[in-house]
Image (tube, grey):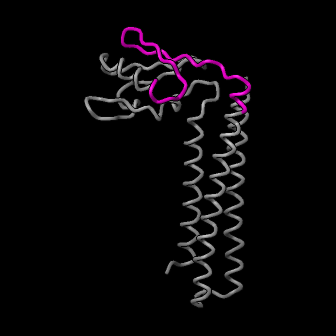
Amino acid sequence: MQSVDEIFVETEDHMKKSIIKIEDDLSAIRTGKATPALLDSVRVDYYGTSVPLKQIASIAIPDSSLITVQPWEKPLAAEIVKAIQSANIGLNPQEEGGFIRIPLPSLTEERRQDLVKTVKEMVEDGKIAIRNIRREANEKLKKLEKAHEISEDDFYRYEEDIQKITNESVEEFDKISEVKEKEILQF
């Protein structure tokens, strides 16, 4: 059986990982500003193996509405263009002599509202994950109490401490959501 300290360490670790995952997931949402993270999901066929784009090309952001991709091997440019188009991320790459330019069209107000809705859904999923982590920690504490390894008073005190960690994580999600929504709605 885990000790109380192990339960707290594991709970905090799981909650931090949930926050990091949501931050990573949200970085792939287009905000109207160019970012290399928009291409993180793109995988290219590289001599029969599917590899992430960033492993076979350099990605640059010359301005806020343009992404450029420079393959390390010129013949890969056509494969990269095909991979970006088939990734279904709403980008239209243009190849020019082994160099790829990806202009970002400005977002419509309707599309911005859809993206905000998506962000809220993703953040809510993250909050659900946090609450599940809290529930698991409380169940472990309850087992310790039933095994008479901690007193009932200790159980309630530890439960409050777990709730404080949960509240901090939920607040972090709210901050992340607020920042991303402002980014999306910014013209």
Report the span colored magenta. 85-113
Q: Which residue is drawn at 71% across and 85% down?
A: 153
Q: Of all residues shown, which one is farthest toward the top?
A: 97
User: Considering only vertical position in the picture, is 163 above or below 57?
Assistant: below
The structure residue drawn at horizontal position 66% and vertical position 69%, both measured from the top left corner, is 162
Q: Say above or below: 2 vs 183.
A: below
Is residue 167 covered in magenta? no
Residue 140: give x, y in percent of width and height: 57, 77
Q: Residue at x 65, y 57 (%)?
A: 128
The C terminus sits in image quarter? top right
- Tell whether 95 sits left or right of 7: left
Q: Which residue lies furthest to the bottom in this view?
A: 148
In-front residue for pair 184/90: 90
Up-down relation of residue 46 to residue 77 (above or below):
below
Q: Position of residue 28 (x, y in %)?
A: 56, 35
Q: Where is residue 40 in the image (x, y as percent from the top left)?
A: 47, 34
Measured along the vertical axis of the image, is residue 74 above or below residue 18?
A: above
Q: Residue at x 72, y 72 (%)?
A: 160
**Residue 117, quarter of the rendered image:** top right
Residue 184 percent location from the top left of the image: 69, 31
State the residue in front, 148 or 96: 96
Q: Which quarter of the picture shows residue 114?
A: top right
Label count reads 0
Asked whether residue 95 is drawn in magenta, I would say yes
